[in-house]
């Protein structure tokens, strides 16, 4: 059973815009994870930046969710 302060906090958080709730959720999950590995985080930041640039420059092949799901299911079946 949630305490009154937790219920109040939850209500305030759920009233935030989606992007802010996502950022908060990310921060909370990170706080539960193992100690931060800056080298890995930096590598992922570079990879994400590289992928965004590919999208912005029209060099990336974008597919919709259904196509992605089909490809992943095919890969899993091939195992």
Image: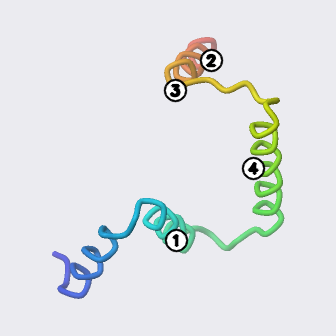
- 1 vs 4, front mark: 4
Residue at image mark 3: 65
Judging from the image, what secondary structure is the residue with disc 2 in? helix
Judging from the image, what secondary structure is the residue with disc 4 in? helix
* Cα–Cα gap, marks 3 and 2: 15 Å
Which residue, as the protein is rendered here, is positioned at the far bottom? 5
Residue at image mark 1: 32
Residue drawn at (63%, 16%), measured in percent from left and top?
Answer: 79
* Cα–Cα gap, marks 1 and 3: 29 Å
Looking at the image, tell me whether mark 1 or mark 4 is earlier in sequence order.
Answer: 1
Looking at the image, tell me whether mark 4 or mark 3 is earlier in sequence order.
Answer: 4
User: On the picture, is 51 further left or further right than 20?
Assistant: right
Q: Give the quadrant of the N terminus.
A: bottom left
Looking at the image, tell me whether mark 3 or mark 2 is earlier in sequence order.
Answer: 3
x, y percent for residue 11:
25, 74
- 1 vs 3, front mark: 3
State the mark number for residue 75. 2
- 2 vs 4, front mark: 4
Looking at the image, tell me whether mark 2 or mark 4 is earlier in sequence order.
Answer: 4
State the mark number for residue 43. none
| Marks 1 & 4, CB-CB < 8 Å contact | no
> What colour scheme does the image use?
rainbow
- 3 vs 2, front mark: 3
Looking at the image, tell me whether mark 1 or mark 3 is earlier in sequence order.
Answer: 1
| Marks 1 & 3, CB-CB < 8 Å contact | no
Q: Quadrant of residue 30?
A: bottom right
x, y percent for residue 53:
81, 44
x, y percent for residue 71:
60, 17
Judging from the image, what secondary structure is the residue with disc 1 in? helix
Q: Identify which residue, 51 or 55, lies in the foreground.
A: 55
* Cα–Cα gap, marks 1 and 4: 23 Å
| Marks 3 & 2, CB-CB < 8 Å contact | no
């Amino acid at each position: 059973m949630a305490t009154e302060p937790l219920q109040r906090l939850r209500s305030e958080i759920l009233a935030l815009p989606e992007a802010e709730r996502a950022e908060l959720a990310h921060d909370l999950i990170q706080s539960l994870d193992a100690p931060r590995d800056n080298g890995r985080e930096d590598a992922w930041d570079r990879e994400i930046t590289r992928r965004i640039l590919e999208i912005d420059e029209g060099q990336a092949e974008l597919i919709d969710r259904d196509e992605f799901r089909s490809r992943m299911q095919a890969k899993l079946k091939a195992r």
